[in-house]
Amino acid sequence: MTTWLQEQFRRYYARPRIHFPDRFPRREYALIPFGEQHMQRHLAVKTREDLQSLLERRVPAHIYYSSAYYETPDAPTMTEKGWMGADLIFDLDADHLPGAGGLSYPEMLAAVKQEMIKLLDFLQGDFGFGEADLAVYFSGGRGYHCHVTDARVQTLGSQERREIVDYITGRGLDTQSLLQERTVYRQGNITQTSLEMPLPDEPGWRGKISREIIRFFQSLLDAPEEEALQQLTQFEGIGPKTARTIYEGLTPQRIQRMRQGKFDQFPYIKKMAPHLIRRSAVELRGEPDEPVTADVKRLIRLPGSLHGKTGLRVEHVPLGDIDQFDPLVDAVVFDDSPVALTLKKGTAISMKNRSFDLQPGSHTVPAYLAALLVGRGLATVDS
């Protein structure tokens, strides 16, 4: 029996907006049909029309393609496929963000987008990849994918790819060496020291950490007092009293000294330094997902396809538009046709610039919201 959501997918796949991968006939494809958990793998297409026909005939809930290129992509075993190389893929998933359990869906999407922005800074600023080598996609679910297609990465093995992950996540980084205490005056038993930090224009990790420290304290100075105090008390060991002491002592002159490489000697500010350094990294616990990046045979969602649990499109995000990109507006494909459904659980969300606050029970909602609720198992469409 065709479900309501499957019928919506069928209509979309009659005229989809697919971003065909480079050398797409060399890729393996895989899909998960509606109502099933098992992934059907080892599929191949020779032409764009073949892929279009596959989508129209099968109407998958989820469809993927391989990051790898193969001599025989539809061979039944990896050995027989004949690996030729693979794109470098970063899969950032909001499910693994620290504190994600306490975030709403829109908050998770906003938080993981910031991780993607940090990742792009590493890939462009530290590794030198150009815009033509990078493609960013909203996953259709709870994260973002970044595809690096530069020919120089395609033959890298798993170990080399892990080293890239180690760098961007700061694994093994000696944070203590980044803040150096130096003696500036000594006479007899009297010693004065100065704590030095990297300059913001230094390359690599040093400049990145300096900019994050300066950015954070500047944001406190610019923020309303209540908001600044709330940010400070999120740090371990800093209560309301200490937060107020830090805030009241924060001046433009102190931040200017940081720009000159002189870190603040106030003990609580020094205590915050390791946490601020960690903020410069892209977290390993899901952003990026290390097994995805290191896996040279990984399957990733097909750009332009639909996500079976949200009804949202795997949407291309131009690098220059990422700050303004809103998945709950820009990745929505279904219209606002009214759909009668029964909601199992109360839900509050904004989509297409409309706010919804729904309690359990019967409702009539736009098709785009119905797709999200049904896909997530929160509602059933009335027959």
Image: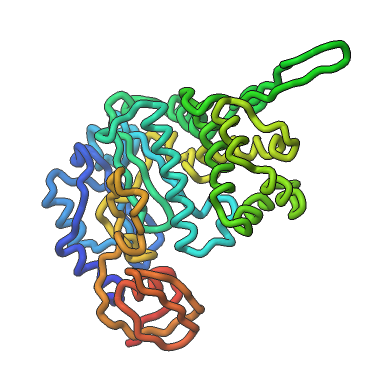
**Which residue is more in the foreground, 201 or 331?**
201
Q: Position of residue 154 (x, y in %)?
A: 31, 28
Give the residue at x 26% y 65%.
Answer: 333
Give the residue at x 36% y 42%.
Answer: 146
Q: Position of residue 33 (x, y in %)?
A: 32, 62
**Which residue is more in the foreground, 21 or 131?**
131
Q: Which image quadrant for residue 5?
A: bottom left
**Which residue is more in the foreground, 115 or 291?**
115
Give the residue at x 35% y 46%.
Answer: 300
Q: Is residue 42 visible?
A: no
| 361 sits to left or right of 130 | right
Tell me if residue 326 comes above or below residue 252 in the rendering. below
Q: Which image quadrant for residue 342?
A: bottom left
Tell me if residue 246 comes above or below residue 37 in the rendering. above
Q: Position of residue 187 (x, y in %)?
A: 83, 11
| 83 sits to left or right of 253 | left
The residue at the far right in this view is: 189
| 22 sits to left or right of 372 | left
Q: Quadrant of the N terminus?
A: bottom left
**Which residue is more in the foreground, 222 or 325?**
222
Give the residue at x 85% y 17%.
Answer: 190
Q: Position of residue 296 (x, y in %)?
A: 38, 34
| 124 sits to left or right of 198 | left
